[in-house]
Amino acid sequence: MKKIIAFGASSSSASINKTLAVYAASKIENAEVTVVDLADYMLPLFSVDVEQRSGIPEGVYRFSELIESADGLVISLAEHNGSYTAVFKNLIDWLTRIDMNVWKEKPMLLMATSPGGRGGATVLAAAKSFFPFMNGNIVAEFSLPSFYENFSEGALVDQELEKQLVDSVGELERVLTGVVVD
């Protein structure tokens, strides 16, 4: 059984990205899914001065160990003003103080959603270009536009979007199981 870490890159208790990440992860067969809530990783704002005074917070080590323990990752990025949420960027900044190998080459389904029609496209593009520098192994991606119109009662309502998500989840599963498709 594969161990999957799933989270929405937001600290909101009503995060639509966490909802999407959990939904996508639930589609992975033979997987033990651990859902992470970034609200459990509220850290002091990264600063070299804070690090010198207090060291690296324990939560940073716990999060890094979670990533290390996983076989795969399902991450859905919330977009704040075209970029990462402050809580997520701060967590990444702290994680790089342990090791620049933040994502530890774990196969990753990278996603984003938003209430708007672009589905977090800007933050998704930023992550696709940035995560590989931290050993992010992005094997599949998915963007869900207009979350509140396309996700209802715990499921995607648009069949074409559902097919796209299932295909993306399938790609992650293939990598996790070592199945190569030509």
Image (tube, grey):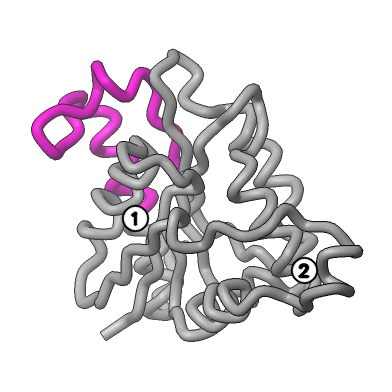
Q: Is 148 colored magenta in this rendering?
A: yes
Which one is in front, 109 or 148? Answer: 148
Disc 1 secondary structure class: helix
Tell me the kind of residue under disc 2. Thr
Residue furthest to the left in view is 153
Quarter-of-image position of residue 15:
top left
Residue 43 position (above or below residue 159): below
Q: Is 40 colored magenta in this rendering?
A: no
Which one is in front, 86 or 42? Answer: 42
Magenta stretch: give its range: 141-169
Which one is in front, 15 or 110? Answer: 15
CB within 8 Å, label 2 to label 1: no
Kindly report the distance in space between the C-alpha atoms of the residues bearing marks 2 and 1: 28 Å
Locate the N terminus by quadrant. bottom left
* Residue placed under numbered mark 2 in the picture: 96
Question: What label does residue 169 carry, if any?
Answer: 1
Which residue is found at the position 79% from the left and 61% from the top? 133
Tell me the kind of residue under disc 1. Val
Q: Position of residue 160 (x, y in %)?
A: 26, 28
- Which numbered mark, 2 or 1, is in the foreground of this view? 2
Q: Position of residue 85 (x, y in %)?
A: 59, 39
